[in-house]
Amino acid sequence: MKLFEFEAKGFFKKAGIPVPEGVVADTAEGARKAYEDLGGNVVLKSQVLAGGRGKAGGVKFPKSSDEAFAMATEILNMKIKDMPVEKVLVERALDIKKEFYLGIITDPDKGCPLLMFSAEGGVEIEVLAAEKPEAIRKVFIDPRYGLMGYQVQFELQQAGLPQELQNGIINAARRLYQVYWDMDGELIEINPLVITSEGKVIAADAKFNVDNSAVPRHPELPKRPARTIEERAAELGLSYVLLDGNIGIISNGAGLTMSAMDFLREYSSSPANFLDLGGGATQASAIKNGMKIVFENPNVTALLIYVFAGGPRCDVIASGVIEALDEMEKEKSLRTPIVATLHGRYKEEGMKILSASKSPYLYLETEVEDAVRKVIELGGHSK
Ligand code: GDP
Ligand code: MN
């Protein structure tokens, strides 16, 4: 789950990381009022779940309340990276002397938290990593002990930071780690972390992504409108359409998927969805994600997996089915029979992998029509 800048800054503030005083507005009039309440000298910042807002014109400095109104109007009509801007953060502007980068991610290779610091903040970290990787200093964090002050201090010294700047940054880093840890963060970032002309350390920007699996155990996270199954499927790169029947279908290729739907109708049954894995479904994760998506629809009483592997391979698809079954059985979330029929490349190997499964929910058929009859027999007809 991604948080907006103003939401992330709420968590920062609670953890004792200094952030500028600010107000969120969802209308231009609200932004004008915020300008006046803060006594002018503010920055207007578009709130979207993307970086690069500065470059896209989404960060503006009004010089009067009328200008605040006009600029907020402009910002609230903008789209940044295809996302409409619905809110604008009105913040007391900072007198910036220097910009740093400070962030923590869960390192995908080591699986542990990784702190990154750079004296060259302000630019996106991906850009910095590509153009000047030596400017990024990295600290792996042992989660048993957390982030130690001396670890950060060493990096700051290596980066040549003067003594008087070190404590403020070390504090920010340790608190940032605490937020990341307490909230099951996946990525947490301050870019830029600013030193003002008075020598204060302030988080001028904030980015915070929480591990999706951990969202349910953090009631303090903001509530988001529920997304549809189709939206979630699209995020996973699956071509999925929700229908009103009860037999789930996973197939590959639009033509084959439609013929599976026709087969069902032939036997007076009806599909719960259209799901075409596509010719690119060469990885086990495609069918695994597909199965989870299909079962999100509560109307599904049985699932038909009908694959003809031309590009992809049956054995890879079969491994994906097994992985999904294992995961769902571990979560005890599977209560629905699955009938699979695999054809094409590595068919024997695929069927062999499936037949080795001990899952009571999995049925295999060599002929398509038998599979269709079976899935209807198991799933019944929709009410
Ligand atoms: P991003 O482009 O989406 O990462 O948005 P940022 O919040 O990082 O803003 C982009 C840039 O605007 C920053 O790198 C700063 O240089 C500048 N900026 C943001 N807030 C302020 C501010 O309060 N005062 C000044 N002078 N510059 C700011
Ligand atoms: Mn930024």
Image (cartoon, rainbow, N blue to C red):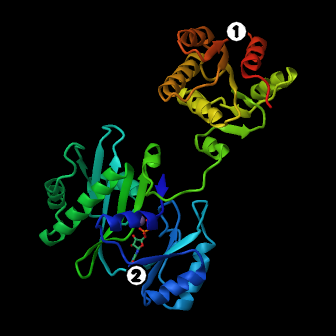
Whether 373 is drawn above or below 85: the answer is above
Q: Are marks 2 and 1 in contact (CB under 8 Å)?
A: no
Residue depicted at 79% across the width and 29% down the height: 382
Where residue 91 appears, as percent x and y from the top left, is: 43, 78
Element type where label 2 sits in the image: strand
Is residue 369 visible in this depiction of the protein?
Answer: yes
The residue indicated by pointer 1 is: 366
Decide which of 103, 248 is in the foreground and name it.
248
Element type where label 1 sits in the image: loop
Q: Amino acid at mark 2?
A: Arg
Decide which of 26, 43 is in the foreground and name it.
26
Question: Which of the labelled discs sits on residue 92, or is there none?
Answer: 2
Q: Amino acid at mark 1?
A: Thr
Residue depicted at 81% across the width and 23% down the height: 264
Residue depicted at 21% across the width and 68% down the height: 168
Ligand 1 within 8 Å of disc 2? The answer is yes
Is residue 121 visible in this depiction of the protein?
Answer: no
Q: Earlier in the sequence, mark 2 or mark 1?
A: 2
The mark total stands at: 2
User: In the figure, is residue 150 to the left or right of 185?
Assistant: left
Whether 343 is drawn above or below 70: the answer is above
Q: Is the C terminus in the top left, top right, bottom left or bottom right quadrant?
A: top right
- Report the Cα–Cα distance between label 2 and label 1: 68 Å
Where residue 355 appears, as percent x and y from the top left, is: 57, 9
Where residue 309 appears, as percent x and y from the top left, is: 65, 19
